[in-house]
Amino acid sequence: MPTDRIDIRHVARLARLALTDDEIATFGPQLGSLMTHVDALAKLDTENVAATAQVVPSRNVQREDAIRPETILARDVVLQNAPQVQGPYFRVPRIIAEEG
Amino acid sequence: MDPLKDSARAIARDVNARTTSAAEVAEALIPHVERVDAQLGAYLELTPGLMRERARAVDARVAAGEQLPLAGVPVAIKDNMCLMGTRTTAGSKILETFVAPYTATAVQRLLDAGALPIGKTNLDEFAMGSSGENSALGLTRNPYDLDRVPGGSSAGSASAVGGFEATLSLGSDTGGSIREPAAFCNVVGFKPTYGRVSRYGLIAFASSLDQIGPFARSVEDAALVYDVIAGKDPLDATSVDREVEPAAGALREDLRGVRVGVVKEFGLGDLDAASRAVYEAAYADLVRLGAELVDVTLPTAEYGLATYYLIAPAECSSNLARFDGVRYGLRVDGADVGEMYERTRAAGFGPEVKRRILIGTYALSSGYYDAYYLKAQKARTRIAEDFARAFERCDVIVSPAASSPAFRFNAKSDPVTMYLMDYYTIPGSLAGLPSLSVPCGAALPEDGTRPMPMGLQMTTPLFTERALLGYAHAYERATMHAEKLTPIVILSPPPVIPSPTTVILSLSKDDQR
């Protein structure tokens, strides 16, 4: 069982997910076991098979570049679910470090 | 008239004829649901105020001469669909306080058709799960055995209809999340063709697979909902612009001339003896109704799970990137924005969601894309081709909807064991096909005391919903399996018996076997 096959810490960083040591210990073997199951796919011949992009026949659809009032939310409605606001803005922690 | 037990069709007929009113239906339902849900836990939030408000609006419209297809019909909504002004949590701590600022198209169409929203139902977090146990916000029980799971991910929507807490409900199905809980809860669960029903306002899990569909206590009621919610929506570019043939009034009563495909790879050999007997009897009933059984093969079906558990997590990891503590939901502060993201997501997501985000991120990460995601999308093409080939020889494919009846809580702690529950439902999902589960009998689990319901899955070619519902209706009318079981949560007010558990009584003949 390739339990350490996935570098969980690296993947978690990519996923912006902080994991505890316990989680790393649990998820590592679980994901390894799942990926072993998934490896069976290698046996399936997909030479000259197109990848599915859409399961139902569809083509690119263009619409008029017009405003749909029913899809527009008022600013205060949008901000109402925000964890932190400042005036009419979403407030976030510092993104760019101050110059030393 | 009994609004707790009547069909949607009967309720709408009576409300439209004004022999009863939507207000009366609402007043009958609200106290009943408040009482029963203390046991079942199908709902995360009840919306009695909204229900009464809509009931008044429906009565006014009917009084003004309108006839509405779902006039006064109580419906429950899976809590991954937005209903303006109600909390919409997806069963996750990360959205625990989120209040929907708009209404999903499918939900709006139900309301416009006269339906009354009872509340928002529990689900596996972000619809990821097969038992209902992955909700971060509540425990939903199976109405036929309170010690067993309702199935998932549309746990509350199935439990509510099976337990007579709603006449209809909406669920969503990505790899079986309507069909499997429908089988567990003795109801009809129907996933239309991918793209038939708008996903606008549905919290995305795996966008190339997600589809909204109904739960009902009869095929006819499921068809009634389908007729209301299906069709092109300008707000969802992936909704299909194709005429919807109304199904509710066009359901057949027999299966004469219908070729029913029995899939070699979906043999009954892996089931326990009691379950196998249920399906053998179901197939015999199909023949009795005039169908011809045809052996078909789906050679790539065995790759379904592997394919699905790459594609769905990959899409989930991408879709759930939006939960970053900035615009909505939970935020856990950190020293900088990166730490804030990581802590927010660590605190907000449960274990199954984290697992799938990790799998998906890994499968999409640099160097692995071709081996995993691209390979899976090619496998998906082969699975769809297998179905197309099978449908040259048959009109409908049947199989079990799940590999066992509802199991006990905490019975499947290993994720891969849980994923195997979806063995029968996943291939059809990958091919985008319309598929449903209809009650087909009951089996006594080895560790159980009551026979538990089971579901027959039927799957047909793309866009043939009307035919599919017709086959299921013919089978249902001839067998009436759902009515042979009674939920453990009794329907009328509890009789006066001096016991603290008076409401847990069984009434059905089946239960006394």
Image (tube, helix red, strand yellow):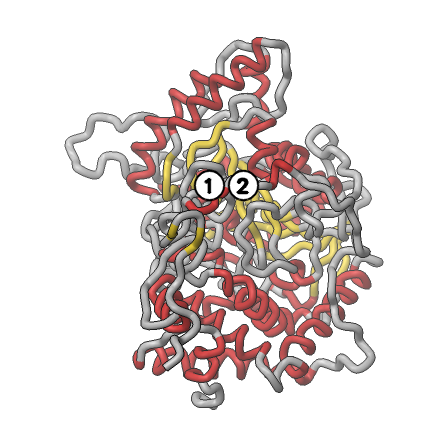
* Residue drawn at 54 percent across, 73 percent down: B360
Q: Secondary structure at mark 1?
A: helix
Q: Give the percent coordinates (x, y) of residue B34.
A: 32, 32
Q: Secondary structure at mark 2?
A: loop
Question: In the image, is residue B480 above or below residue B419?
Answer: above
* Residue drawn at 53 percent across, 64 percent down: B271
Q: Give the percent coordinates (x, y) of residue A25.
A: 34, 82
Q: Give the percent coordinates (x, y) of residue B329.
A: 40, 54
Residues packed near mark 1 inside 10 Å, few (<14), some (14 to 19) or many (20 plus): few
- Please name whichever residue, B211 or B321, is drawn nearer the observer in this view of the structure: B321
- Please name whichever residue, B138 or B263, is drawn nearer the observer in this view of the structure: B138
Amino acid found under the numbered disc labelled 2: Leu
Check if mark 1's residue and mark 2's residue have beta carbons within 8 Å: yes
Asked whether the viewer can see residue B481, the reply is no
Asked whether the viewer can see residue B279, the reply is yes
Question: In the image, is residue B218 above or below residue B453?
Answer: above
Q: Is residue B127 left or right of residue B470?
A: left
* Residue drawn at 55 percent across, 62 percent down: B319
Mark 1–mark 2 distance (CA, rounded to whole Å): 6 Å
Q: Is residue B58 left or right of residue B298?
A: left
Amino acid found under the numbered disc labelled 1: Val
Checking the image for residue B472, the label placed there is none
Q: Is residue B198 left or right of residue B77?
A: right
| Residue located beneath label 2 in the image | A73
Checking the image for residue A77, the label placed there is 1
- Please name whichever residue, B453 or B429, is drawn nearer the observer in this view of the structure: B429
Q: Give the percent coordinates (x, y) of residue B62.
A: 58, 13
**Which chain does the residue under circle 1 lie in?**
A
* Residue drawn at 43 percent across, 73 percent down: A96
**Residue A21 appears in which quarter of the rendering?**
bottom left
Residues packed near mark 2 inside 10 Å, few (<14), some (14 to 19) or many (20 plus): few
